[in-house]
Image (spheres, grey):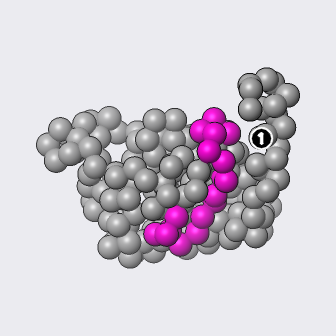
Amino acid sequence: MKFSIDNYASEHARVFGSMDTLAIQRCLDLIAKTIVEGKKIITCGNGGSASTASHYITDWNKMYNLASGEKFRGVSLTDNIGLITAYGNDIGYDEVFAGQIKALMDEGDLLVVVSGSGNSPNIIKAIEAASDAGGKILGVLGYDGGKAKLLCHEIFHTPSWDMQICEDIHLSFGHLVMKTICESEINPRL
């Protein structure tokens, strides 16, 4: 399809409208449950998805704390360039997230992976490390979900092969979470 503003907007609406709302709700519930239980939420992704993973933690941490006065235990594995380059240089880029997970993740914590393809080797290794630690895994995935789709406990799947549509909707997921954790019954002040 040739690009135009109208085509982009209509494709965006079509894809978002085709998504499984029950699956989306399960993802929101898993994040809310993790927060209520005082467990950590850890995010990761590559490229634009790295920025999205960081954006999630920024929004969720600040807004949940402001709305509730409660602690939010979240970290984005994309935010420490020293650790990323140390693992990348000394061990290999495939281990930049798994290495951090091995140091941070406890049983019951939640890993949120953000990936257009769901096939990046460092994302798959992160999922495996989280699973080995007894964590839960939520995949925010595009395309057909890739290998990650089969390894995650819950999936927010954007069924599109257009990376920009996927990235837009993946960012929207972060805002859905923020609205949920700041305005729902899990928030003790509301």
Q: Residue, x 59% and y 51% (percent of image)? A: 142
The residue labelled by disc 1 is 12
- The quadrant holding residue 71 is bottom right
Looking at the rendering, in which quadrant would you find the N terminus? top right
Does residue 133 appear to the left or right of 143 in the view shown?
left
Residue 28, quarter of picture: bottom right
Quadrant of the drawing holding the C terminus: bottom right
Q: Position of residue 59 (x, y in %)?
A: 62, 44
Furthest-front residue in this view: 1
From the viewer's side, name the closer residue of 144 and 115.
Answer: 144
Image position, residue 19 (x, y; %):
75, 58
- Which of the pair 98/73 is nearer the observer? 98
Residue 90 percent across, percent down from the top left: 14, 43
At a point 70% along the width and 59% down the height, the residue shown is 181
Residue 150 is one of the magenta-drawn residues: yes
Q: Is 2 contained in the magenta span?
A: no
Q: Residue at 74%, 26% (x, y): give it.
A: 2
What residue is drawn where x is 64% and y is 58%? 157
Q: Residue furthest top?
A: 4
Q: Is residue 161 above or below residue 6?
A: below
- Residue closest to the eye, 60 or 173: 173
In what element is the residue under mark 1? helix
Crowd around label 1: few <14 · some 14–19 · many ≥20 (10 Å): some
Q: For this view, does 94 lie left or right of residue 41?
A: left
Q: What's the amino acid at mark 1? A: His
The percent position of residue 22, horizontal first and vertical second, equals 76, 70
Residue 83 in view of the camera: no
Q: Magenta region: which residues?
A: 149-165
User: How many numbered marks does the figure carry?
Assistant: 1
Q: Residue furthest left?
A: 90
